[in-house]
Amino acid sequence: MAKKRSDIYIESKKRYKNGEKLINIARALGIPEGTMRRWKFEDNWDGKKKTANNVSNERAETWASEKMSVRNEKIGRPQKEIDIKTFEKLCGLQCTITEMCSFFDCDDMTLSKWCKRTYNMRFSEIFAIKRGSGQISLRRTQFRLAEKNAAMAIFLGKQYLNQRDNNDQNMGMTSNINFIGFDKIEEE
């Protein structure tokens, strides 16, 4: 059974539909302004569809579009731009993360996030891969240098050919060595 509205309710709704403001109707009829607002909202005098959070569709759509526009706007500090080729060259030179951060003028977290974003790997993983080119270059230079420098040739022989220095020292063993003319020195 529908609620029976009073004559004041019917009169206030008629006046509202004729364009009078709620506050003026409430004063003229001697009822609280809040009651007028509640009647207007509950019975949908404007003909607008109610939403779950008691906001008209128009207002809800405006709120949603404003919220979406805020989400689309990037807030915060812009991302640091790091050149991929320069980063890979620094890895080839075996630079530490601290040295790279100093070069790119950023902190280690920024560089780590950049690696994750760019390579989809952690810094340590990408560094292990990219430093290989530096090792190849270093080895090539060492072999060229070994052609001219004996010390480098010895170093490379020890590192890659398992060569070693032979230090044959017989400690604790006595040998009978006779020197010629040693007897003459003792006699004198």
Image (spheres, helix red, strand yellow):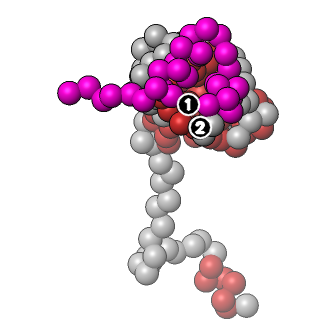
| Residue at screen point 74% across, 36% down | 106
Q: Please, what secondary structure does the residue beneath circle 1 have?
A: helix
Q: Quadrant of residue 142?
A: top right
Q: Residues within 10 Å of mark 1 (few under 14, many from 20)?
A: some
Residue topped by disc 1? 36
Q: Position of residue 72 (x, y in %)?
A: 60, 16
Q: Amino acid at mark 1?
A: Met
* Nearer to me, 147 or 47: 47
Q: Is residue 157 above or below residue 130?
A: below
Residue topped by disc 2? 31
Q: Is residue 132 above or below residue 45?
A: below
| Residue at screen point 47% across, 12% down | 48
Q: Is residue 12 magenta?
A: yes
Is the magenta region chiefly helix, strand or loop?
helix
Q: Residue furthest bottom?
A: 187
Q: Quadrant of residue 143?
A: top right
Could you tell me if the residues under marks 1 and 2 are in contact, i.e. CB atoms within 8 Å?
yes
Q: Position of residue 91 (x, y in %)?
A: 61, 28
Q: Position of residue 41 (x, y in %)?
A: 48, 25
**Magenta-colored span:** 1-29
Q: Position of residue 145 (x, y in %)?
A: 67, 25
Q: Earlier in the sequence, mark 1 or mark 2?
A: 2
